Amino acid sequence: MFVPQTMTEMWATMGSTIASFMFISAIIRQYCPYELRLYFGKYTKLIMSFFYPYIKISIHEYTGDRLKRSEAYAAVEAYLSINSSKCAKRLKAEMAKDCSKLVLSMDEYERVKDEFKGIKVWWVSSKVMPPSQSMYPQQERRFYRLTFHKRHREIITEEYLKHVMQQGKDIRLKNRQRKLYTNGSANKWQIYKQTGWSHIVFEHPATFQTLAMEPAKKQEIIEDLVTFSKSKDFYARIGKAWKRGYLLYGPPGTGKSTMIAAMANLLNYDVYDLELTAVRDNTELRKLLIETTSKSIIVIEDIDCSLDLTGQRNKKDEKSPDEDKKKSEKETRKEHKEETSSRVTLSGLLNFIDGIWSACGGERLVVFTTNYVEKLDPALIRRGRMDKHIELSYCSFEAFKVLSSNYLTLEAHPLFDKIESLMKETKITPADVAENLMPKSPLDDAEKRLSHLIQALEEAKAAAEATEKAEKEASRINAQADEATKPAEGSAKEDAAQPQENSHFKSQIAH
């Protein structure tokens, strides 16, 4: 056998061998039928699989009709973004959809190694180019390929892939951009939209740390929220949908909307702001519910002002046929307008909150806000629908100290004692306190803003005392008026009885 003695001869021999293989391959492709080549390739791979000790699993970016990106592919991409940024030599940087920061991932045909319970596996990023002869332009099909030894098949398929999916979802959740959704009014163009919701990026800065509330009450709410977010198995065990209702009630300006933003920031949830007056009927309300995602807060603000959902469910007054015929043209137009507006009923809303359809998805909060809780139907706010009732009342001294720290970076001041005594004697909302603490010019200092707050508290106290005095005076006048009418009523009764006595006397004389 001839062995090349020099590097030049070795390369020449290798080149001629490769050229021979290429020539034979070209001949086979030219003259061998496609079916025969397919048959030969199929059984060649089958024979080689008996000797090849590795198993390969491909995870494609798009499956089926290619309209939706594969969740499995996105999870693997997020999982490998941690390892690939450390090991891979060729990376690509992308601003992924719904992601708040730049994500580094493996470039095409890059290979990285991973280890799980002492088992080594390999990931390769690859793609399949579409045929150039195609009449319609197509995009390349990207996929990840996992390779591992066949003796670890059970561990990889049952444990490792589950680990990759969970870690990938957690990374995506951590990096995602949270959104604030709202529903638009129903119209004929909505059939062309994929969803009834539109959204913007949710960037509200409110947190429980900056929320003006008593520390003990604040901690109770935080613990309740965190416990709910970790209770998936508990809800499954007791047979309830994984959701929880919160009713926030109190006077205007007490921080109900800020509380919702703080809840979303604490749990890293999206917010769906549902406008009931823009929902056509109960069916559309159900569709909107189906389109919401897990890890979200569904909010209906000022529920007492949304449609006719307040008060008891009374029967409508019956009207006579004559009254129906006398309806004016104006009333008819008004009824027609009401028919074309929202027809969401209390029953539809109750089913939306905790009916069968409410179990689709999971990990949702349903939040109602109202200024007048007494106006709401008891069925709407009972436990099981609104599980936790949170009263947001007037500003306390503890809440004031939080606002003072936020606005003036003050933890203590000589004027705090006077403010505390005034707050015990009068009512003021956190919004009013915040407005008085807000610096209005570069020359404003802490003492000036606190003095403004003291002045506002004194004015509120004086106004409350004046109102109370006026109410007492009105009550006294009403009482005096009632006393004055009693003798008049007695004399009227005597005058009514006098003619009867006179007629009886006259009859006796005639007799």
Image (tube, rainbow, N blue to C red):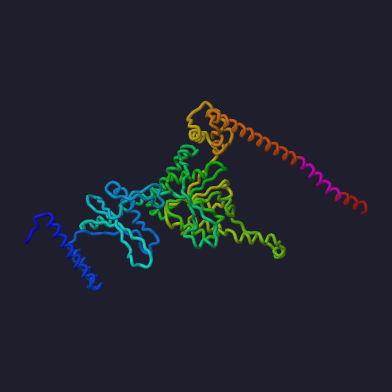
Picture coordinates of residue 123, whole percent (x, y): 27, 54
Residue 268 in view here: yes
Per the image, is 487 magenta?
Answer: yes
Quick one: which residue is furthest to the right in this view?
510
Picture coordinates of residue 426, whole percent (x, y): 59, 34
Question: Is 435 left, or right, of 22 in this rendering?
Answer: right
95 and 504: which is toward the camera:
95
Per the image, is 390 magenta?
Answer: no
| Rendered view: 44 above or below 484 | below
390 and 281: which is toward the camera:
281
| Rendered view: 3 above or below 401 | below
Residue 244 in view here: no
Question: Is 124 left, or right, of 383 in this rendering?
Answer: left
Give the prevailing secondary structure in the magenta stretch.
helix
242 and 178: which is toward the camera:
178
Q: Residue at x 41, y 45 (%)?
A: 226
Q: Which quarter of the picture shows residue 15?
A: bottom left
- Per the rendered image, the range of residues in magenta is 484-499
Number of numbered tags placed on the structure image: 0
Picture coordinates of residue 16, whole percent (x, y): 15, 62
User: If the image is split into quadrants, where does the C terminus sit?
Assistant: bottom right
User: If the image is split into quadrants, where does the N terminus sit?
Assistant: bottom left
Question: Is 31 left, or right, of 216 in this rendering?
Answer: left
Quick one: which residue is furthest to the left in this view?
1
Quick one: which residue is furthest to the top in this view?
414
Quick one: which residue is furthest to the front in this view?
8
Q: Residue at x 85, y 51 (%)?
A: 500
Picture coordinates of residue 423, whole percent (x, y): 56, 33
